[in-house]
Amino acid sequence: MVFFNLTGRRLQPFFQKASWFFDTPVCKPEPGFATTAIQSLCREGDIAGARKLFDEMPEKNVFSFSTMIYGYSSNGFFVDSLHLFSNMQDLQIHPNSYTFVALLLASAGLRNSKIGESIHGRVIKNGLEFDAFVSTALLNSYSKCGSVADAYRLFCASDRPSLAHWNAMIAGFVLDHLFEEALLLFERLKLSGAMPNCITMMSVTQGCLGHGSLRLSESVHGYIVKAGFESDLSLMNSVLDMYLSFGCLDIAGGFFAKMEAKDVISWTNMMGFMLDIAHPVDALQLFSQMRDSRIDVDVVAMMIVTSACTILGDLTKGRNVVSCNAMISSFGINGRAEEALSLFQEMENFGEKPDSITFVNALNTCVHSGMVDEGLKYI
């Protein structure tokens, strides 16, 4: 039974010839074994491998079907999940709560309220409308399909909504641009005695942004700090985005500087804002700091840097060694070696002395461009 602890990728070679696996009397597994393998493959995004294994199963039950349906839905294959459910019905296998959660994820992904309503009817028929997971999935499905009124009716029908219900409903209001309703529901949540979590606060920060009140946003930020949620990087990025969207450079800059951790999203949000307010040099300085922090550069960061370099063009005013280093680095990463080395040569023309980082960037440019002989000049 050691195979249960292996990941889908490590299991895959054993199942590449699934018919051999299932036809071997000694190795013939229980359905639960294969279902676990299917789940692992789906988590890794290997839907084709999971479906092959599923099709080769000699015996299928509600758990194997539900796992495959959920695998389709969670990987964006919404129509395939609905088709597989139809096959499940043809075999007269009765769905369970896991099946309906997977189907509602598909209806939400398709943004199709008619499908959601049909699934809701089946949920009621199977007596699962009060199941905690199914009811939350229903709220999410109706909200994402633009039927927030139906979602709210379901929410109000619950005697004791769970935190997942509160979160789904607040997120639904935000998604439908009903920001004031979302914030009022957040206040009701606090009065109910339930404790919001980081998921709640992500929606609330988006609600504050949509509402357009900086004062309210600062109050929510204070609540986040008081609740001890500052270690959640995704939430901190949401707070940063909230302040940047209000155009509050001083507040956003101070918040950014105090962030305990930063990822590429944190840096690119700040860089993008600097570019938006016509501060390309500051954007490049942030890029240089991001590289110094050993944060991997993504396509968004490179687009910002390229735009900043384009804005600066041949201008020498406002350049300094930090911005030049950022520009040389970005040119090198984008395969524009000649421009990178040309800028290196031009630095002395506008009174900037290259530092150690400048030389490292120039050398990296030469290495990545196969210009070994040229690189020797900078040693």
Image (cartoon, rainbow, N blue to C red):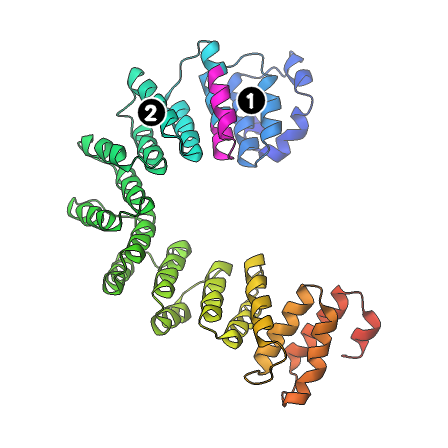
At label 2, counting other C-alpha atoms closer than 10 Å, the crowd grade (few under 14, some 14-19, many 20 or more) is some
Residue at 35% x, 33% y is: 141
- Confirm whether the magenta stretch covers residue 71: yes
At label 1, counting other C-alpha atoms closer than 10 Å, the crowd grade (few under 14, some 14-19, many 20 or more) is many
Q: Is residue 148 above or below residue 235?
A: above
Q: Left or right: where does residue 4 sit relative to residue 253? A: right
Residue 379 point in image, percent of width and height: 77, 79
Residue at 23% x, 34% y is: 155
Q: Which residues are magenta?
A: 70-86
Q: Can the viewer see residue 64?
A: no
| Residue 150: quadrant of the picture | top left
Q: Left or right: where does residue 358 sit relative to residue 303? A: right
Q: Secondary structure at mark 1?
A: helix
Q: Is residue 105 above or below residue 246?
A: above
Residue 241 point in image, percent of width and height: 39, 61
Q: Secondary structure at mark 2?
A: helix
Q: Left or right: where does residue 77 sit relative to residue 52? A: left
Q: Which residue is mark 2?
A: 117
Residue 39 point in image, percent of width and height: 52, 29
Q: Amino acid at mark 1?
A: Ala
Q: Nearer the viewer, mark 1 or mark 2?
A: 2
Residue at 68% x, 78% y is: 343
Which one is earlier in the sequence, the residue at label 1 or at label 2? 1
Front-lying residue, 159 or 249: 249
Q: Amino acid at mark 2?
A: Glu
- The numbered dot on residue 34 is 1
Residue 353 point in image, percent of width and height: 65, 87
